[in-house]
Image: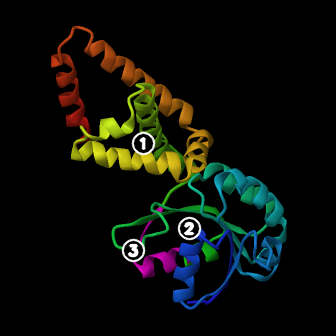
Amino acid sequence: MKKATVGIIGGTNGMGRWLADLLTAQGFTVHVTGRKTQMTAVDAARICDVVVISVPIAATSSVIAKVGPHVRKGQALMDLTSLKKEPVALMLQHSEAEVVGCHPLFGPSVTEPSGHNIVLCRGRGDAWYALIRTIFENTGYTVLERTPGEHDRMMAIVQVLNHFNTIALGMAIAETGIPLSEVSQFSTPIFKTKMEIVKKIFTESPELYADIIAGNPDTNEVLQTYERVVGKIISLLAKGDGSKLKDSMESVAKKLF
């Protein structure tokens, strides 16, 4: 396998650091850039075979526009963001290099590849795409090849709908005015688990989840569905008993499971 030189823009932490560690362990020469590194993003783009954009969603567009023109034919430009339609389109627009969209469906703490998937989207070219796919598969990850549109549609469910529901739960609990310390005394194991997720989303990287929801092109459609379903549940409970809701849940269970 060709041992390419890889530059990871935003590789000092997060998923960029995860990829840097993976590639280094495979014998690749990896350069990482960040706000405090001596090497700049443009430096990496000029000297590396593969250039990876791994910055926050809100900064991705501007970084691609800045770096893309310096990644030439024969090189590859790849991103690690959780959205794919816009980043892939921008990479194609701003660079003549081969283009690959990539989204690992897990966080940077993952060290055991078994059971974890990585989505790859073809942008332009085949050679670097094939190498990148081989690296992930040989390491033990499962690679899903999808179009950017297919990826974002699935993420509208897995991320947008999921995180929106968690944010709504946290905001609704806050609106009750009851201190969480008091609520916690009545917590069940499932509620405790949910509140751990609420805490993570609200306190660790709220900008990440806000950007994921706001940036997905299918957000409006999936949230309209969510709104309709909430309205339907309220109407099913209008008569004061849960029989109609139970029937609806049983019907949905047959569809899902």
**Which type of secondary structure does the marked residue at label 2 adopt?**
helix
Sequence-first tag of 1 and 2:
2
Give above or below for 97 relative to 25: above
Per the image, the residue denoted by label 3 is 113
3 or 2: mark nearer the eye: 2
Residue at image point 64% right, 73% down: 12
Label 3 vs label 1: CA separation? 23 Å
Label 1 vs label 2: CA separation? 21 Å
Q: Position of residue 179 (x, y in %)?
A: 39, 34
Give above or below for 229 relative to 257: above
Q: What stretch is highlighted in magenta?
A: 132-144
Question: In the figure, is residue 19 to the left or right of 247?
Answer: right
- View extreme (top): residue: 239
**Residue nearest the observer in this picture, 65 or 204:** 204
Label 2, residues with CA under 10 Å away: few <14, some 14-19, many ≥20: many
3 or 1: mark nearer the eye: 1
**Which type of secondary structure does the marked residue at label 3 adopt?**
loop
**Which type of secondary structure does the marked residue at label 1 adopt?**
helix
- Total label count? 3
For badge 3, the amino acid type reads: Pro
